[in-house]
Image: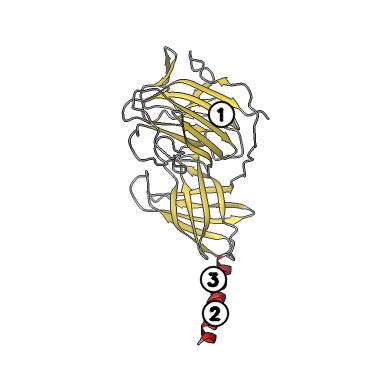
């Protein structure tokens, strides 16, 4: 009996080791990783983003970011042929219709393919591997720049025909939905201090490098989420909701170095040195390896700013 028990233990150990080795010997796919995409949408190049990764031994899953909305989960990425793949996702903010169906192929280190939109139209897209953005330990900082001068819109431009932005009594204001406001100057790594105020029920945001939206919304009292105030939209959830009441002045202090961001809302650090995976919906472009401007969302709800100070990292 003792011999049989020992033999059984040995068999179980061997079986366990085999399963463990199998878990650590997953097949690697060239498609895996994060990709910066450009999609032909409504006559323009719409920045998008795609992540493909393992789930278990054989299944590929992912996330997709389109021209608007949050990061959308992909339940399964199916592969076929030589480096070809397909997946589908339901609509989010798109017009009602069919699921969006993707077909793609990896060739010469780049992706290309088509997407069947919810209305049945076919969009072409291309993609390149998202760059690794270097992180600088113990950075040195340059002099602060008052990007908003308190007088006018010098140093800014809008992205649409309607410019609803006005400066009154030292306050930068978007009183109604219209165009987004973009800095003329572009930045790489920085610290940002802003003071903002919104009316009840409003919704806005600040795009870091024009690509990563830090959410601004009237969310006081709600459980923290990545689509609420303090979050990097659809990606990073704040550890608490530190919002004040609508109508009160609030502050953001943000540090972005490479992909790593720290967010302090009203004196409370709600995201600490976290990695932003990729661009968020509504980004100006998907060229993550380049410096980018700040963009203040003006196409949602009313918003006010009385301070917008950027301190770039010394190179």
Q: Is residue 242 left or right of residue 20?
A: left
- Looking at this view, name the residue that lies furthest to the left: 200
Residue at 51% across / 16% down in the picture?
149
**Marks 2 and 3: which is nearer the front?**
2
The reply to whether discs 2 and 3 touch (Cβ–Cβ < 8 Å) is: no
CA separation in Å, label 2 and label 1: 58 Å
CA separation in Å, label 3 and label 1: 47 Å
Image vertical order of residue 307 relative to residue 214, above or below = above
The reply to whether discs 3 and 1 touch (Cβ–Cβ < 8 Å) is: no
Image vertical order of residue 12 relative to residue 21, above or below = below
If you read the primary sequence from the N terminus, does the residue marked by circle 2 or circle 3 appear first? 2
Which disc number belongs to residue 37?
none
If you read the primary sequence from the N terminus, does the residue marked by circle 2 or circle 1 appear first? 2
Horizontal and vertical percent position of residue 107: 61, 55
Q: Which secondary structure lies at badge 2? A: helix
Q: Which secondary structure lies at badge 3? A: helix
**Where, by quadrant of the figure, is residue 217 drawn?**
top left
What residue is shown with label 1? 191
Q: Quadrant of the C terminus?
A: top right
Circle 2 crowding by C-alpha within 10 Å: few under 14, some 14–19, many from 20: few
Given residues 200 and 153, the one toward you in this image is 200
If you read the primary sequence from the N terminus, does the residue marked by circle 3 or circle 1 appear first? 3
Circle 1 crowding by C-alpha within 10 Å: few under 14, some 14–19, many from 20: many
What residue is shown with label 2? 11
Given residues 251 and 268, the one toward you in this image is 268
What residue is shown with label 3? 19
Could one spot residue 205 in this view of the protein? yes
């Amino acid at each position: 009996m003792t011999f049989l028990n020992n033999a059984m233990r040995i068999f179980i150990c061997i079986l366990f080791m085999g399963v463990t080795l199998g878990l650590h010997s997953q097949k690697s796919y060239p498609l895996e990783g994060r990709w910066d995409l450009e999609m032909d949408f409504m006559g323009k190049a719409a920045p998008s983003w795609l992540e493909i990764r393992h789930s278990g031994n054989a299944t590929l899953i992912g996330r997709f970011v389109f021209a608007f909305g949050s990061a959308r989960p992909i339940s399964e990425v199916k592969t076929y042929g030589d480096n070809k793949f397909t997946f589908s996702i339901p609509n989010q903010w798109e017009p009602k219709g069919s699921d969006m169906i993707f077909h793609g192929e990896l060739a010469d280190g780049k992706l290309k393919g088509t997407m069947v939109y919810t209305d049945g139209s076919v969009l072409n897209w291309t993609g390149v591997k998202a760059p690794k953005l270097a992180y600088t330990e113990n950075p040195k900082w340059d002099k602060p720049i008052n990007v908003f001068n308190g007088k006018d819109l010098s140093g800014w431009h809008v992205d649409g025909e309607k410019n609803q932005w006005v400066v009154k009594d030292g306050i930068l204001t978007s009183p109604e939905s219209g165009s987004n406001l973009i800095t003329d100057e572009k930045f790489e790594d920085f610290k940002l201090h802003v003071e903002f105020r919104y009316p009840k029920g409003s919704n806005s945001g600040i795009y870091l490098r024009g690509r990563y939206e830090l959410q601004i919304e009237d969310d006081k009292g709600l459980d923290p989420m990545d689509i609420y105030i303090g979050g990097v939209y659809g990606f990073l959830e704040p550890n608490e909701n530190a919002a004040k009441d609508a109508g009160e002045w609030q502050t953001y202090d943000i540090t972005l170095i490479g992909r790593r961001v720290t967010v302090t809302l009203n004196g409370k650090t709600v995201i600490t040195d976290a990695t932003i995976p990729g661009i968020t919906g509504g980004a100006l472009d998907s060229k993550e390896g380049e410096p980018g401007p700040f963009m203040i969302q003006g196409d949602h709800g009313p918003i006010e700013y009385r301070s917008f100070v950027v301190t770039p990292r010394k190179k």
